Image (cartoon, grey):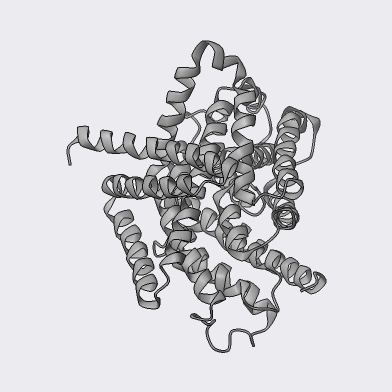
Amino acid sequence: MSESLTAHLRTASALSLAAMWGIEVVKLATGSRVAAWAGMAAFLFYFLAALAISRPAQRWMIATVATVTVALTVHFGIPSSLSRGIESAVLFAAFLAAMQMLRTTLESSPVMHAARSGFGALPPRQQHDSLVARTHLLSSVLAAGGLAAVGPLLTRTRPEPERRAFAQSALQGFGLVALWSPLLVAMAVSTRLAHASLAGAVLSGLAMAAIGLLLSHVLYGGRVERSWVLPIRRTILEAAVLAAAIILVNRFWGIGNLEAVVLGIPVLALWIGRKELRPGAGALSRRWVASLATIAVEALVVGAAMVLGEVLKDMISQGMLQPPAGLEGLPVLMLIALPPALMLGTSLVGLHPIISASVLLPILASIPVLHPVVVVGSVLLGWMLTIVLSLFVVPVLYAAALYEVDPETLVVGRNRSFCALFIPLALGYLWALNTWLPK
């Protein structure tokens, strides 16, 4: 494929993502079925464009998931499940487009530049604490962009061991965000497929992330001092306000988790970028579309997995698919440990965590002894482990490129030791939570 054609297809896929966001807003505002059909048509066009520019391994994965999904709907005669799955994929595309809109405006915010000051003078262990905290907070709204946002704190003249430690600290901060942030795909997928309360899942995830942050501090951090805490206080406040706003919109306006993000986040993005809109609305829009082009293929992996997850969920609810025999009889702790073990294991051989999560969530959500919030927490724990330990998941490769280190060195040493200690603590917390929450 020529470079010119690839560029045109990448632009077409980005514009399709933007169009699906606009269509979804119209659908949510009017309830129009015409908008719903328009969104599905846009998704099919996007599917073909993004599939054409994907890497061979990605193309194989997406094609396999799509083929299995269509085969299931044809075999069981449930075309309505497929159409609902595509509608969900359109909603996820709109969610991702809204998040990229926020990221685009935040990247140009003076707050981002202020958050990078005063880092170099800190002792190494305090640098770890500062880096984990900054990456954690920024990633809660920027996702993997949080890894890039802290990059300027590190000069490229530092020796390789220091850059490696820097990248490992950043990955710990980013990985723990997957446990609670309502703005990440992991939380959106999990709460939708498990029918869990967003507020409950976020609060539970915050508690689990706090355990991880404390453990990381005990293992590798230094003294808690004003010199590194004060520079990030504004970032703490803004991340907390953003997360609380999403939860409140979801809870009191009576709309779904993803719908709250699709409608609310662009308003926030416009407020953040208001000073740039008057002189440069066109430039800001072009940066948004360009940012959509960078995630077009990864967004398609999410969309394809989401369609499969919705079809599996319908099959379970209609009795067409039963959980594996004997699964309900397993001890609760083993059921909670199942997603982390399977998701990490399959990610180590190249399977994206969203695929395994989309299969596991509907099955575990159908087991009465597990609370939906605990199901979400268990899957998010598995997702977090893949972010920190798998060479086939984007954050590890992204961090390696950003900080110029070998990716294989990032998943050993500090990160492997951290996860070995964090897993039993997190599983114990989820088991206790499942015991306490009413079923």
Which residue shows up at 67% across the image and 52% down it?
180
**Is residue 262 shown above or below 102?**
below
The residue nearer to you, when weighing 358 against 164, is: 358
Which residue shows up at 45% across the image and 63% down it?
355
- Left or right of residue 232: residue 316: left
**Is residue 275 shown above or below 300?**
above
Which residue shows up at 76% across the image and 55% down it?
207
The residue nearer to you, when weighing 182 against 131, is: 182
Q: Position of residue 413 (x, y in %)?
A: 54, 55
Image quarter where the C terminus lies is bottom right
**Is residue 41 shown above or below 433?**
above
Q: Inspect this view and state whether residue 412 appears.
A: no
Q: Position of residue 336 (x, y in %)?
A: 65, 73
Q: Inspect this view and state whether residue 235 appears.
A: yes
Q: Position of residue 403 (x, y in %)?
A: 47, 37
**Is residue 148 shown above or below 332?**
above
Quick one: which residue is furthest to the top in this view?
A: 279
- Left or right of residue 209: residue 308: left
Q: Position of residue 1 (x, y in %)?
A: 17, 42
The residue nearer to you, when weighing 407 against 47, is: 47
- Left or right of residue 129: residue 401: left
- Give residue 260's quadrant in the image: top right
Give the mark count: 0
